[in-house]
Amino acid sequence: MPPTEQRPPVSHRKLGIFGVAAVVVAGLVVATGIRAREDSSSRLREWTDEQAVPTVAVALPSGRALTPTIDLPGRLEAYSRAPILARVSGYLKSWSADIGAKVKAGQVIAEIEAPDLDQQLLQARADLVSQQSSARLSEATLNRRKTLVASNFVSAQEIDERTADLANKVAAVNSGQANVERLEALAGYKKITVPFDGVVTARDTDVGALINAGGGAGPAMFVVSDITKLRVYVNVPQNFVPAIKIGAKAALTMPEYPNRTFAATVEASSQSVDISSGTTRMQLALDNSAGELMPGGYANVRLNLQRDAVPLHIPSSALIFNQNGLRVATVGPDDKVLFKAVTIARDLGKEIELASGVAADDRIITAPPDGLADGDPVRVVGPGAKGKPTASEKQDVKG
């Protein structure tokens, strides 16, 4: 057999070095694991603390220097409108103007047959003739009696009585004359005339219809309207009234003319607030010389508002409405919540125009979570954030 090859024995010194190295490596591994575990626990504690503080997004109120406007519904009315009622009773004999007819001032548009009035006038005239004859007889008798006073055939007492009788007869004549003139004036109302140039916008009578003087509770026989100029009535909410001045301009749109606008001017204000609606009625003047627009029609009225300061706008989602009223949540310099009461000027849908309550540099929480209270700390993210990055943000950076 070949001789067996023998390895040299390992020295005790080398074994000691290897043992020490193994212990050092094991210690480093254990220390690294402990350090990593401590870092992970620290980050977990920091993340847990952050989750206990609400995270909010903020925005600054935006100011717009554009001319503000408000859209309101309006109602068109004729500038002059006259319901025509009868002054005498009778039956309608004829009419000559139907709805839509253009008429002139003084034009006769209907005639009433009034037999009762005609008979009263005939009787009054006959009574007047009788009274005049009686007065002439009394005057002649008085004159004859006066010639006999000097001969003492007639006493002074009789002359006084005859004079008084003549005065009564003359008064009766005057009364009869006035009665005749009154009835003649009433007879003149048998012809229905137009008070001003315009258009017949309503007719509620026909030939043979019974006509009552004054109309009673019934409708007018005719309605005549001057539509060359229209009045536009708008009910303005109380908070906008100071921003709408007499002479302010407005643009009107009509359903029948969707691609056109009509200019109008604020002409008058009722200077009072309707307690049932909280609005003030304003009157605008609108030229309608072309006759395109109709009284009674609907219009959308866009009014220019005059503001002393530029209004501020915030997102609609920032509003909080509860038992404490209408408020917004703001974030102070210390990143703590501060609630502020606000007043709405206009609801613009996605945005709210405020009349008061916030400043231009207030950080408004755009979507405040439930349960917020004054003084609560919050974590601000987005453009309005400031300070050190959070643990989550650090993790995002590392990732």
Image (cartoon, grey):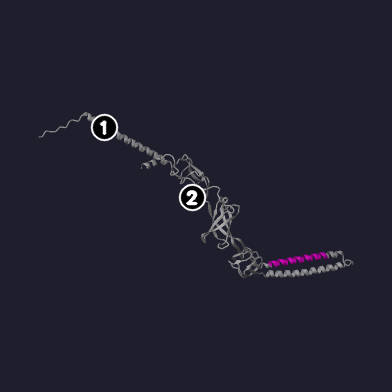
Q: Is residue 349 above or below residue 123?
A: above
Q: Position of residue 196 (x, y in %)?
A: 63, 64
How much space separates mark 1 and mark 2, taking CA atoms? 71 Å
Mark 2 falls on what kind of element? strand
Mark seen at residue 193? none
Q: Amino acid at mark 1?
A: Ala
In the image, residue 222 above or below residue 342: below
Q: Which quadrant does the C terminus fall into?
A: top left
- Secondary structure under tag 1 reads helix
Q: Which residue is mark 2?
A: 351
Please identify the dominant SS of the magenta region: helix
Q: Amino acid at mark 2?
A: Glu
Q: Residue 292 falls in which quadrant of the image? A: bottom right
Q: What residue would you read off at disc 1?
A: 21
The magenta span reads 162-186
Q: Which residue extends farthest right? A: 151
Image quarter for residue 192? Answer: bottom right
Few, some or many C-alpha atoms within 10 Å of disc 2 (few <14, some 14-19, many ≥20)?
some
